[in-house]
Image (cartoon, grey):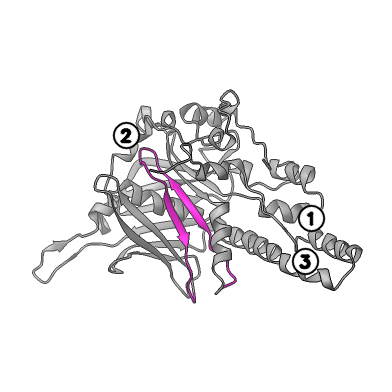
């Protein structure tokens, strides 16, 4: 295995399989969190506010991280609080801000590339043939999570509980990027994990001639049915703005507004306001989606991760280009001597322009882990 991770709560749980050992989404993690996902309140506006600095209420206090770790195993030693989620109900003048809040976190263990970071240590130990800064960037893996805040206004047993995760899949992103020959831009693939929900929700970027388009399915685990939804990028706007559509009818459901002038990064999720029909009766076809915790969570985590999309695009674009150089490597057999060829590609590796294989984390492999080894 390329990496040997360490996580405090897994050290005494040797299962004999590394992918299973680092699969942190287990039944004991979601016992209380299931109650959260069952609530389904009708929120009409959700604000995701990512801070410019870490000097906010959720980070002040020596025991804060320990409190979150005691509430959920999803909050690890490498977790850093980066923002909060604020909820609103009602429309227009009747809109009210809820007391209930959540925090947004990122797992810095898989994202930080500083000199003393775990990623940089691995690069220095195992990939000295490459430029360390460049190689460290392509090894990053995005893991954004949300938790109920520890504020006094929250319900006691729900404080600090995990409410969802947004994780990019290195395996799927690289595979989809190589599979689409019509464009040079990468096609990131993410998984959303939600407590109490039996399925991982895939969120993937798909091919477009212009702009961005992401798609995801909403699975009904009671009827075994699914409906596709589209998150379509808006063109000619100052921020990363998106409209959310029903994939079947292309009816607009919500608007994801990236507040471009906010220093840290603020994204509003505004649901479409119901309108009266010709007879004057109010029609609200999307109330069930506003109350659907899975649908809410996908949009919240998508919005919380927006600021990291461009770094992800860059790292997979660089990886894609470096791995495609293998074609030139084989062609040079007939053009160069062995010494000349090795020297050429030694320099190419130093600049990260040549890469045979892409290293992935055991945490990534746990996304694709098949414990039964068979499907029936």
Q: Disc 3 on helix, strand or loop?
A: helix
Q: Which residue is mark 2?
A: 35
Query: Which badge, 3 or 1, is on the more N-terminal residue?
Result: 1
Question: Looking at the image, which residue is at 47% across and 66% down?
Answer: 206
Task: Residue at 44% x, 71% y: name it.
Answer: 234
Q: Is residue 304 visible?
A: yes
Left or right placement of residue 40 versus residue 215 in this view: left
Magenta stretch, main secondary structure class: loop
Query: As rendered, which of 172 and 253 lies closer to the eye?
Result: 172
Q: Secondary structure at mark 1?
A: loop
Q: Position of residue 197 (x, y in %)?
A: 35, 41
Q: CA distance from mark 2 to mark 3?
A: 55 Å
> Gap between marks 3 and 1, in whole Å?
19 Å
Depth check: give the residue in front, 316 or 174: 174
**Horizontal side of residue 265 vs 343, given as left or right:** left
Label 3 crowd bin: few (<14), some (14–19), many (20+), radius 10 Å: some
Mark nearer the viewer, 3 or 1: 3
| Residue found 32% across the figure and 34% down from its top | 35
- Across and down, in percent, residue 183 comes to 56, 73
Above/below status of 78 relative to 188: above
In the displayed structure, 140 sits above or below 99; it is below
Residue 353's place in the image compared with 370, above or below, is below
């Amino acid at each position: 295995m390329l990496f040997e991770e360490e996580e405090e709560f897994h050290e005494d749980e040797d299962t004999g399989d590394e992918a299973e050992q680092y699969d942190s989404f287990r039944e004991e993690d979601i016992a209380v969190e299931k109650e959260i996902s069952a609530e389904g309140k009708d929120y009409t506006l959700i604000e995701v506010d990512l801070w410019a600095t870490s000097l906010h209420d959720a980070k002040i206090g020596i025991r804060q991280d320990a409190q979150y770790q005691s509430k959920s195993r999803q909050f690890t030693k490498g977790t850093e609080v980066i923002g909060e989620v604020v909820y609103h109900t009602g429309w227009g003048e009747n809109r009210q801000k809820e007391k209930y809040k959540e925090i947004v976190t990122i797992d810095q263990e898989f994202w930080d590339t500083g000199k003393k970071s775990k990623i940089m240590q691995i690069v220095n130990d195992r990939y000295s043939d490459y430029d360390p800064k460049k190689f460290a960037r392509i090894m990053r893996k995005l893991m954004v999570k949300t938790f109920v805040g520890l504020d006094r206004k929250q319900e006691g047993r729900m404080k600090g509980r995990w409410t969802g995760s947004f994780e990019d899949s290195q395996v799927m992103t690289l595979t989809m990027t190589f599979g689409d020959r019509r464009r040079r831009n990468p096609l990131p693939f993410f998984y959303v994990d939600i407590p109490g929900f039996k399925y991982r929700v895939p969120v993937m970027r798909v091919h477009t001639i212009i702009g961005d388009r992401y798609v995801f399915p909403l699975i009904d685990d009671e009827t075994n049915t699914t409906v596709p939804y589209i998150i379509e990028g808006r063109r000619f706007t100052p921020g990363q703005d998106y409209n959310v559509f029903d994939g079947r009818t292309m009816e607009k459901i919500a608007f994801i507004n990236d507040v471009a002038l906010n220093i840290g990064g603020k994204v509003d999720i505004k649901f479409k306001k119901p309108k009266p029909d010709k007879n004057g009766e109010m029609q609200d076809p999307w109330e069930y989606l506003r109350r659907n915790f899975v649908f809410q969570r996908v949009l919240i985590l998508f919005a919380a991760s927006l600021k990291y999309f461009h770094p992800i695009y860059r790292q997979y674009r660089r990886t894609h280009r470096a791995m495609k150089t293998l074609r030139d490597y084989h062609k040079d057999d007939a053009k160069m001597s062995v010494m000349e060829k090795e020297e050429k590609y030694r320099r190419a590796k130093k600049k990260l322009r040549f890469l045979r294989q892409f290293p992935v984390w055991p945490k990534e492999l746990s996304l694709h882990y098949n414990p039964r080894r068979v499907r029936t």
